[in-house]
Image: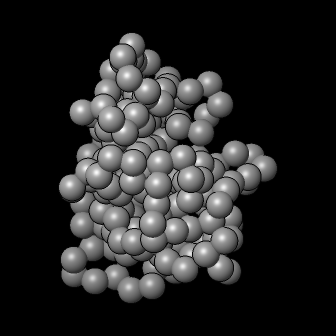
């Protein structure tokens, strides 16, 4: 893991492309993470349970201000609202974009009871250009206490995610490798 002038690089890797657990390394920090229930894929599809392989910019951090203090980070930071959602309906014009509930098309709720989205790092997956059906709502977020696989995101324990945020900037990238 190298720190370069163009920003920090995070590397998420596991033992094989089918692995559902891995590690995130950032400088001398190294934390366990969980990945999608079907492993990693270079050909990510909506609903396939895979974490996409690639290099992704980290766009912003969303957090539950009713549950956490403002995280320390240099990425754009915004508290979540109860109405926040993320469109996961491929035919919709707002596919893979933040939306407000109630929303007429399929959209994941970002305000959750289970604490998984208490902190969300929005990744640039399928962003420019957005291709319908190539995956939506791929985030870095809080892992379940049992560290079970995600639906395609990268998840870390809350203390690890908060620690990692301290090192991230607008130039940080996440490398998801095999």
Q: Is residue 89 visible?
A: yes
Question: Residue 76: horizontal and vertical position, in percent?
Answer: 26, 46
Quarter of the figure with residue 6: bottom left
In the image, 133 versus 97, the foreground residue is 133
**Residue depicted at 78% across the width and 50% down the height:** 146
Furthest residue toward top: 102
What is the count of numbered marks? 0
Q: Is residue 87 left or right of residue 144?
A: left
62 versus 50 height, above or below:
above
Q: Residue at x 30, y 62 (%)?
A: 57
Out of 178 and 44, give the one closest to the viewer: 44
Q: Which of 106 and 125 is in front in this view?
A: 106
Q: Residue 120, located in which quarter of the rendered image?
A: top left
Q: Name the outermost residue toward the front.
A: 91
- State the residue at coordinates (39%, 13%): 102
Q: Where is residue 55 in the image (x, y as percent from the top left)?
A: 36, 71
Task: Name the residue at 21% across, 55% down.
Answer: 129
Can you say which quadrant of the picture contains the N terminus? bottom left
Query: In screen coordinates, is 33 left or right of 77?
Result: right
Identify the image quadrant of residue 35.
bottom right
Q: Can residue 10 be seen in this view?
A: no
Estimate the x, y position of residue 21 in percent, counting from the top left: 68, 66
* Drawn side of residue 109 relative to residue 57, left or right: right
Q: Which of 10/21 is in front?
A: 21
Residue extending farthest right: 146
108 is higher (above) or lower (below) than 16: above
Q: In which quarter of the image is the C terminus?
A: bottom right
* Figure colour scheme: one colour
């Amino acid at each position: 893991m190298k720190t370069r002038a163009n920003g920090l690089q995070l590397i998420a890797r596991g033992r094989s492309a089918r692995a559902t657990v891995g590690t995130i390394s950032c400088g001398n920090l190294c934390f366990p993470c969980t990945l999608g229930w079907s492993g990693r894929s270079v050909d990510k599809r909506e609903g396939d349970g895979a974490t996409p392989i690639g290099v992704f910019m980290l766009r912003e951090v969303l957090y539950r201000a009713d549950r956490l203090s403002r995280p320390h980070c240099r990425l754009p930071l915004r508290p979540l609202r109860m109405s926040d959602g993320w469109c996961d309906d491929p035919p919709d014009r707002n596919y893979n974009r933040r939306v407000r509930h109630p929303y007429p098309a399929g959209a994941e709720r970002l305000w959750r009871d289970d604490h998984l989205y208490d902190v969300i790092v929005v990744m640039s997956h399928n962003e420019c250009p957005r291709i319908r059906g190539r995956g939506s709502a791929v985030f870095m977020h809080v892992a379940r206490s049992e560290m079970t696989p995600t639906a395609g995101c990268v998840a870390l324990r809350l203390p690890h995610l908060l620690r990692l945020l301290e090192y991230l900037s607008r130039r940080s990238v996440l490398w998801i490798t095999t």
